[in-house]
Structures are given as structure tokens and as C-alpha cells.
Amino acid sequence: MVDIVNELRADAVLRRKIQKKLPQLFHIAELESSRAGKIGMEVGSVRERILVALFIYKFGAENVDTEIPITESEVDVKVQGMPISIKTLTSHGFAGVKLVWTVDEQSALQFSHHYAPRSDMLFIQINWENHGGFYYIPLGTQREIFGTLGRDRYIKLPRLGTNPRGVEITAEALEALVNHTQTLAIDIEWRREDILFNAFQRWVEHWQQE
């Protein structure tokens, strides 16, 4: 099975490309997902496709599986059979990353009782006009931090009586993960460049074709 951390560590050209292109592509994702100046929830799906495309570029389409069964709700892509969960967060800190989206308190409680890390994690911290990062966190690292902190310090449940938007990983746990020696951390300067973007142009071009 592929060792993604070492593959990325050994590829200095790709790491520099990530630093340069990820802010550009995520900016386009925001423009593509915006209406009346507000970014819609679909931006998360666009970001995910950008990151999956990175794996396809690096490892080849034949080695990247995007057809993930619904039963594997915590897995977004597999690279040479390696399951990976993709998380993105726009923040200067580490609070607010969902482990799972839930619809009720009982589901959240049940998830927290049975949760254990089961896949590698790719976490992107977006921090516009400042520094964030690209963090590839191996499964073993997650299990180590989960065991060290314990379930109550690793998992944050939604407050009772609120509309639960999901079960989160605590900021303490995520900070420990991104700073772990086994995590591949790539510093990214999140600068927006002026981009000429028209959300309708490519669709117009399709209509223009015979």
C-alpha cells in the first residue's frame, strides 16, 4: 500500500506547486460557489474535488477510487486502497472541524460512543491574507493522539437543545495532530489574486458547440 506521507515528502516540486496553486484553486472554488457575494455550502464539495484531483495528478487515475460506498461515511477517497478523509476549515484556529454531520442529538451521541480513527486525514486550514496549511495526518498518528487525549478531549459533541450540525474534533486534538512529527505539514500563504472569472462562460461555450 502506498506511503502517501513519504511520497509527498520526497516530491519537492509537488509541495511547491501545492503552496502556489492551492490558494488560486480554492479562490476559484469560492467564486464558483458564490451568489450575491455570499459563499454557499457547496464550496466544500468543490474544494474536495480539487484535492481529489491532486491525488489523481500525483498517483494516476487508475490508483484513485472516488466511488466510495455510502456506508463509508468518513471516507472521501481511496488512493491505492488507502482510505482518506478530507477536511477543510476557513479559520485562523483549529476549532470547528466536523468528524461527522448529524441530524439529531441521539445520532451524535451514538457516533461519539463508537468513534475511533479509521483512515488517514487530509486537513486544509484556510486562513486568507495569512498563513494556514496543508496537513496530511496518518491513521497511526490519529490513533496515538486519540489514545493520549481520550474520547472526551478528542470529540466535541453539539450542545444539548441546539440544532446539531455535527460532531467535531476538538481544537486541542487537531492542533496536536497537525504539530505531530509524523504529520506532513506544508505551510501555505493564503493570498487572493485578481482572477477574471465568469461562472456562466463555460456553460455558454457548451451551448455554442454543435
Image (spheres, grey):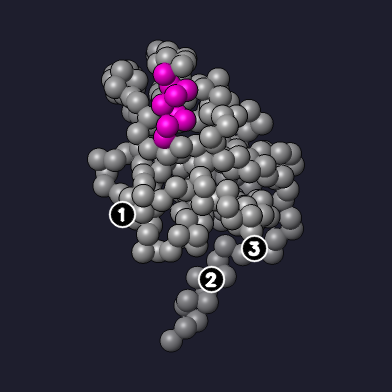
Q: Amino acid at mark 3?
A: Phe
Q: Main secondary structure of the magenta part?
A: helix
Residue 143 included in the magenta stretch of the image = yes
Asked if the magenta segment contains residue 150, the reply would be no
Tell me what residue is drawn at x 27 percent, y 44 percent: 70
Q: Earlier in the sequence, mark 1 or mark 2?
A: 1
- Magenta region: which residues? 139-147
List x then y, in percent, for residue 103.
33, 28
Q: CA distance from mark 1 to mark 3?
A: 30 Å
The C terminus lies in quadrant:
bottom left
Q: CA distance from mark 1 to mark 2?
A: 26 Å
Q: Which mark is residue 67?
A: 1
- Residue 102: where, in percent of width, then height? 35, 29
User: Which disc is residue 197 wearing?
Assistant: 3
In the image, 200 versus 22, the foreground residue is: 22
Along the viewing direction, whichever of 201 and 8 lies nearer the viewer:
8
Q: Which residue is mark 2?
A: 202
Q: Residues within 10 Å of mark 3 (few under 14, many from 20)?
A: few
Local secondary structure at mark 3 = loop
How many marks the image carries: the answer is 3
- What residue is drawn where x is 56% and y is 24%? 176
Q: Could you tell whether 116 is left or right of 179 in the image?
A: left
Crowding at mark 1 (Cα within 10 Å: few <14, some 14-19, many 20+): few
